[in-house]
Amino acid sequence: MNSLAGKVAVITGGSRGIGRGIAEAFLNEGANVVINGRSPEKGSATLAELNVAERAHFVAGDVKVREDVERIIDEALSRYGRVDILVNNAGGSGGFAPIHEMSEDAWQEANQWILNSCFWATRRALPDMLTRNWGRVINISSVEGAQANKKNVSHYITFKHAMNGFTKAAAFEYGDLGITVNAISPGAVETDLMMEAGPSAAASMGITYEAFKDTYAEESAIKRLNTVEEVAALALFLVSEPAGGMTGAIIPVDGGTSL
């Protein structure tokens, strides 16, 4: 269909997992896509696997660093001349512990990784979107941004809630200027990041990684984890013309967990 022909999308954390799935969905609809990640090796491998020649570009960088985030947007503008779509997908946390034992470093890292990276990228991309009075911003939040029923992840819960607040504030500011801002709140999806961080989060709770995953599945109405494809399908709709009337929404793809 090529419904995104001529559009340029930037996706943070796009070499694997949810970001990669969204990148593939956008590419299939004709968009040019700029993805980001910390590993140049993973980036090169991703571009080879996508196999779309000049329609995809990788920018290495750490979204916890403002200059790196801004460079992603700047390289997209330099390479393709515009940024129509921004997906703030990168985000995570480490140093899992009860609040009274959580380190300052763990708290601040989660803030940079989840909330500040989203702010920095959005702030950098908006001026170009405003030149055309058209833009789509999608923030990848979490089911944990709608609840608080897990121990030792207060930092992750807090900053995902904050991301949802930022989504609503940005939607209000730019809704009459042709720019929509929405958040997708996935349930548990077994991405590379979950496989890296999940075991330590589970250990801090005194359970195995398998039990950790089972907890998410059992909390849901569908009794399984969600998939990358399910999240990407919603992202594809939100950047479409028919979704122009949706903004400030926090939309769950969590199998009914947040019921």
Image (cartoon, rainbow, N blue to C red):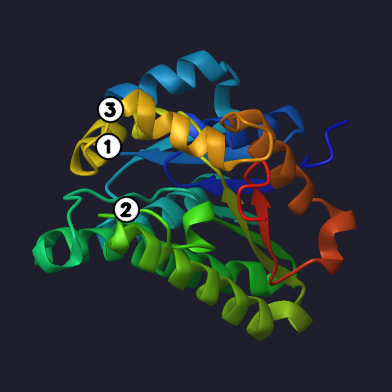
Tell me the quarter of the image containing the N terminus: top right
Please rate how many residues cluster around mark 3, counting C-alpha atoms within 10 Å: few if below 14, some from 14 to 19, many from 20. some
Residue sitting at 50 percent across and 62 percent down? 147
Query: Residue 8: x percent and y percent?
Result: 64, 47
- Amino acid type, mark 1: Ala
CA separation, marks 2 and 3?
29 Å
Query: x, y (%) of residue 52?
Result: 60, 21
Look at discs 2 and 1 and give the one toward the viewer: 1
Is any atom of residue 134 visible in this view? yes
| Residue carrying label 3 | 208
Cα gap from disc 2 to disc 1, whole angstroms: 25 Å
Q: Dot 2 surroundings within 10 Å: few (below 14), some, or many (20 or more)? A: many
Q: Quadrant of residue 248?
A: bottom right
Q: Which mark is residue 47?
A: none
State the mark number for residue 63: 2
* Vertical placement of residue 201 versus 239, above or below: above
**In the rendered image of this protein, does residue 47 appear above or below residue 114?**
above
Residue type pointed to by label 3: Thr
Residue under the image location 21 percent in, 59 percent down: 109
Q: Nearer the viewer, residue 28 or 250?
A: 250
Do callouts 3 and 1 mark residues in contact (Cβ within 8 Å)? yes
Indicate which disc, 2 or 3, sits on the residue closer to the N terminus.
Answer: 2
Three-letter amino acid code of the residue under disc 2: Val
Residue drawn at (53%, 65%), measured in percent from left and top? 125
Q: Residue at x 62, y 31 (%)?
A: 223
All told, the count of numbered labels is: 3
The secondary structure type at the circle numbered 3 is loop
Indicate the quadrant containing the C terminus: top left, top right, bottom left or bottom right. Answer: bottom right
Secondary structure of the residue carrying tag 1 is helix
Q: Position of residue 170 (x, y in %)?
A: 59, 78
Task: Write down the residue under mark 1.
Answer: 202
- Whichever of labels 2 and 1 marks the residue nearer the N terminus, that label is 2
